[in-house]
């Protein structure tokens, strides 16, 4: 029942986003295409630029726009409209250029004005080709709309990203299959619209009055959905609300849920969840813009990724430095520590460690040139990731593979790699019988977890500190590892695991 209601809502959001972008793209591209068909220089320049624009990865463009446009519908609509423009633009130009010259000459012979010739002759004859471009753009846009999940705009992509983060194939299918069906359904609907609008086929395939009524109703419903989606974000945000966010991995979902459920239970605030937003940079930018109010962060990540400080093992109090810098630079506050540190680490199979008699990274370095390692993309680039670790320990792996974090354990389980980059609280370590190797040179800084909140939000709702305080110092390494295990291995949802934890320790 829960998934049924969520599916209905996410489908609603998906259609609204895709429908809005196709409408905007058509409104822009068709008039521009008409101009291009009659101005050769403009046509040559814009078609070449448009063709090149299609090579830009959609997710990269979305991430680029977040600092300027924030999270939610606005950057998503810009990206979707951008990618829908070119197919419609190109088909409009191609359709108008395909109009036979004798038809244009006949129109001129009848004394039709330029506009009348365009409206009564050229556009009707070009319509089948124009509609083919709209159909291509619509199908592609419905697929691309899944990226909206990465910045909290909703849609069916939420199921896909949640499924990837939680290693849940059922959730992935729950998002992927309806997306494919929507693309097929819209393509069929547009093909029928094309037949209806093409007057030349009206006699062979009549469009009955009932179909006209049904089509009108469907159009009205779509417009209402679009309007509702946009107005909900812009106009109807509850006055007493707090937006809680998380990055795109299990532990973040759980910590955000723990905070959200405590706030919902002990205050009259409405909690808006924007989970699975992606990397630290995206979430931090959203916090600075005020698109979100609160999320869990780690001291080491803040120190090196946000503040861009180089880690010095002699640093005594990283938390105090992070707290002061966040307050002075960003007007952001670090609340109490949850009680655990989730450091990065390299892991191997327990049998592998026993066979090679290794327990530390220094010992691993002695055989690293014969080994294959898999790590997630940011670990391969971050200063506190594999490059820095390799320099510190003299690691020289035979092969380095970039793998999504959710597939790392599958890779080592099937012996495709020998070593994987993990976090020390990962719930899958136990399930896959892995051990983490000791960081005997203290390369990694402490990654103590704590809530980060906008200062203005805490001043507005000072009760938040007291409400969240039962979590401070209470979530040990063992407790968070167990919570991660329940979600990653036992397939609890983050909300279920968080609720169970709060009830078990009488925090609700």
Image (spheres, rainbow, N blue to C red):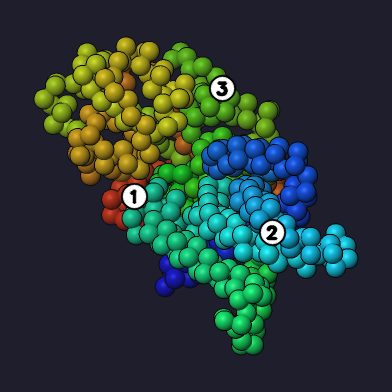
Residue 182 placement (x, y as % from top left): 50, 65
Give the label on residue 167, or none. 1
Label 1 residue SS = loop
Query: SS of the residue at dot 2?
Result: loop
Image quadrant where residue 389 sits: top left
Q: Residues within 10 Å of mark 1 (few under 14, many from 20)?
A: many
Q: Are marks 3 and 2 in contact (CB under 8 Å)?
A: no
Q: Which mark is residue 308?
A: 3
Quarter of the image containing the N terminus? bottom left
Q: Gap between marks 3 and 2, in whole Å?
A: 63 Å
Q: Which residue was labeled with disc 2?
A: 100
- As drawn, is 193 to the left or to the right of 31? left
Q: Name the foreground residue: 326 vs 415.
A: 415
Mark 1 or mark 2: name the one nearer the start of the chain: 2
Q: Nearer the viewer, mark 3 or mark 1?
A: 1
Q: CA distance from mark 1 to mark 2?
A: 56 Å
383 in relation to 19, above or below: above
User: Which residue extends farthest bottom?
Assistant: 209
Residue sitting at 64 percent across and 72 percent down? Answer: 198
Is residue 68 positioned above or below 371 on the image? below
Most foreground residue, 192 or 368? 192
Crowd class of label 2 (few under 14; some 14 to 19; many from 20; radius 10 Å): few
In depth, the one of 91 and 386 nearer the eye is: 91
Comes first in the chain, label 3 or label 2: 2
Q: Secondary structure at mark 3?
A: loop
Which numbered disc flags the more N-terminal residue, 3 or 1? 1
Identity of the residue drawn at 41% across and 17% down: 388
Gap between marks 3 and 1 measured at Cα: 31 Å
């Amino acid at each position: 029942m829960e998934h049924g209601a969520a599916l209905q809502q996410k489908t609603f959001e998906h259609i609204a986003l895709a429908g809005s972008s196709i409408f905007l793209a058509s409104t822009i591209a068709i008039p521009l295409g008409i101009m291009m068909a009659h101005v050769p220089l403009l046509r040559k320049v814009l078609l070449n630029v448009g063709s090149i624009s299609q090579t830009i990865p959609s997710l990269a463009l979305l991430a680029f726009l977040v600092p300027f446009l924030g999270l939610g519908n606005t950057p998503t609509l810009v990206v979707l409209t951008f990618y829908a423009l070119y197919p419609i633009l190109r088909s409009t130009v191609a359709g108008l250029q395909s109009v036979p010259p004798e038809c244009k000459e006949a129109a001129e012979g009848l004394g039709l004005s330029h506009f009348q010739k365009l409206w009564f002759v050229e556009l009707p004859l070009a319509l089948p080709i124009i509609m083919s471009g709209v159909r291509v753009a619509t199908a592609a846009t419905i697929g691309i709309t899944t990226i909206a999940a990465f910045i909290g705009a909703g849609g069916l992509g939420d199921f896909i990203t949640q499924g990837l983060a939680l290693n849940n194939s059922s959730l992935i299918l729950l998002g992927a299959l309806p997306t494919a069906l929507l693309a097929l359904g819209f393509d069929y609907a547009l093909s029928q619209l094309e037949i209806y609008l093409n007057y030349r086929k009206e006699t062979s395939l009549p469009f009955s009055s009932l179909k006209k009524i049904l089509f009108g109703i469907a159009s009205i419903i779509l417009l209402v959905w679009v309007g509702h989606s946009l107005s909900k974000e812009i106009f109807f945000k509850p006055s007493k609300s707090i937006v809680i966010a998380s990055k795109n991995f299990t532990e973040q979902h759980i910590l955000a849920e723990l905070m959200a459920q405590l706030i919902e239970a002990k205050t009259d605030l409405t909690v808006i969840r924007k989970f699975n937003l992606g990397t630290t940079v995206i979430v931090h930018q959203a916090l600075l813009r005020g698109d979100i109010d609160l999320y869990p962060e780690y001291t080491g990540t803040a120190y090196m990724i946000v503040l861009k400080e180089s880690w010095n093992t002699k640093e005594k109090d990283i938390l105090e430095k992070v707290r002061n810098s966040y307050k002075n630079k960003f007007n952001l506050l670090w609340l109490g520590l949850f009680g655990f540190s989730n450091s990065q680490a390299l892991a191997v199979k327990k049998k592998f460690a026993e066979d090679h008699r290794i327990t530390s990274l220094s010992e691993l370095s002695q055989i690293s040139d014969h080994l294959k390692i898999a790590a997630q993309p940011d670990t391969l680039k971050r200063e506190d990731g594999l490059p820095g670790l390799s320099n510190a320990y003299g690691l020289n792996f035979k092969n380095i593979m970039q793998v999504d974090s959710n597939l790392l354990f599958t890779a080592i389980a099937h012996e495709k790699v020998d070593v994987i980059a993990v976090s020390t609280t990962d719930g899958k370590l136990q399930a896959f019988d892995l051990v983490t190797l000791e960081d005997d040179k203290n390369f990694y800084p402490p990654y103590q977890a704590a809530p980060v909140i906008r200062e203005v939000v805490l001043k507005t709702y000072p009760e938040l500190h007291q409400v969240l305080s039962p979590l401070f110092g209470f979530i040990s390494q063992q407790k968070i590892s167990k919570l991660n295990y329940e979600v990653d291995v036992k397939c609890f949802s983050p909300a279920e695991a968080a609720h169970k934890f709060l009830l078990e320790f009488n925090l609700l």
